[in-house]
Image (cartoon, rainbow, N blue to C red):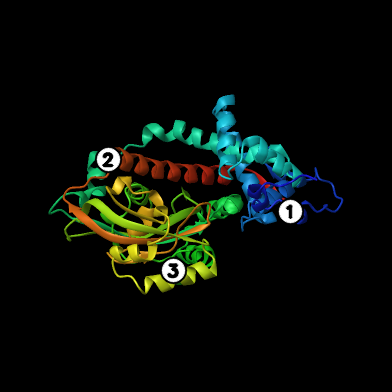
Amino acid sequence: MFKLTPALAAFGLIASLAAPVAAQNMFAPVATINDSVVTEFEVQQRVRFLQILNARGATRKAAIESLIDERLRGEAIREAGMVLSDEGMNEALEEFAGRANLSRAEFTEALSRAGVAPETFRDFVLSGVAWRDLIRARYGSRVSVSEAEIDRALASQGSGGSNIRVLVSEIIIPAPPPQAARVAGIAEEIAQTKSPTEFSNYARRYSATASRGAGGRLPWQDLSNLPPVLQPLLLALAPGEVTQPLNIPNAVALFQLRDIEETSAPVQSYSAIEYAAYYMAGGRSEQTLQQAANLKAQVDVCDDLYAFAKGQPESVLDRETRTPAEVPKDFAIELSKLDPGEVSTTLTRSDGQALVFLMLCGRTAEQNAEVSREDVAGSIRQRRLSSFADSLLAELRAEARISVK
């Protein structure tokens, strides 16, 4: 028998997904789109593929709509004479498989053993890549970002100027290697939502953060207090939109922008962040989380952690002072929500086997910290291209002859 690796086991390749399908005409048309056809085989393949990714939208109706959209995108791509290079196709497929910590060959073999044809995986990925290339080629020259727009986005980055603050919801899903593929599928689904209620429901179901009970909703935060990697991503969002999944050690993070505003409050920026990370064996087990809760009640400042680490290997306690850009991405996300002396127990290390008891020791203030103008401009440009893509697809649908059986 084929022995599943831990990553593949988490990928959902179980016998129930490979159950035989009742005999029927697998090539019967399910939908016609202009001069092309979507077959029963394609619909069943797409549903099964989404099931393996553990996507909640893995329904027959959603699969049909997705395949109709792909046909319409494909027509536009062919009319434009665009063809992906072999190198581009290979890179796209390898990148997608890499989200599950697998090579393209391993990913394809795993799908085949679950009853999904390689062509299903290939078409799903390459359709999206070719569509993005078309949008860039068709609308790229029409998308410009003025210096004034960048200035407004960075208005909080000067002393005495206005400050930008954001209202954000968060989801951080633990993703140790055995669960990485399943979590990647869930995260891709969450990234598509534009409903704050739906995002909050996902947070209550999947998030490991302290905010999960509130549906992932965080209070107003100054943009300049957030990790540098996150600031341009949030600036590029419209209220209700969600960032693409951010891969962090043993987890995946997503953020939804609920609101954004400028205030007259002075900008607070920092040249250094000091924190302590105490690593507790057992990961996110109930026992270790309880131990972390007990420890949290006994410590007030970072210095207190030395007493608990005494007699253990030096590696169980790290105390660092770094610039905001040097702080690990997942640590930076959690530290941005803390005041000195507060603690986060959301993160793990050692493939999920060690819980991180992360405490903020303090911050060193700095005037005039800056977000990269290039990053902000790129994020604004990408948001506008996405709007063009949505409008073009709506236009193609309105003009097409579509019939669903």
* Vertical position of residue 45 compared to residue 213: above or below: above
CB of mark 1 within 8 Å of CB of mark 3?
Answer: no
Cα separation, mark 3 vs mark 2, equals 40 Å
Would you name the residue on which mark 2 appears? 373
Would you name the residue on which mark 3 appears? 292
| Label 3 packing within 10 angstroms: few (<14), some (14-19), many (20+) | many
Nearest to viewer (mark 1 / mark 3): 3
What amino acid type should be assigned to the residue bearing mark 1? Answer: Ile
Is 190 left or right of 218, judged from the image as shown?
Answer: right
Residue 365 visible in the displayed image: yes
Cα separation, mark 1 vs mark 3, equals 35 Å
Q: Position of residue 190 (x, y in %)?
A: 52, 56
Cα separation, mark 2 vs mark 1, equals 47 Å
| Label 2 packing within 10 angstroms: few (<14), some (14-19), many (20+) | some
Residue at horizontal 48 percent and vertical 42 percent from the top: 389
Q: Earlier in the sequence, mark 3 or mark 2?
A: 3
Residue at horizontal 21 percent and vertical 53 percent from the top: 269
Name the quadrant containing residue 141: top left
Name the quadrant containing residue 76: top right
Q: Earlier in the sequence, mark 2 or mark 1?
A: 1
Nearest to viewer (mark 2 / mark 1): 1
* Vertical position of residue 345 compared to residue 19: above or below: below
SS state under label 1: loop
Observer-nearest residue: 33 or 388? 388
What amino acid type should be assigned to the residue bearing mark 3? Answer: Ala
CB of mark 3 within 8 Å of CB of mark 2?
Answer: no
Residue at horizontal 26 percent and vertical 43 percent from the top: 150
Q: Position of residue 289 (x, y in %)?
A: 48, 68
- Which mark is drawn over residue 14? 1
Is 52 left or right of 293, judged from the image as shown?
Answer: right
SS state under label 3: helix
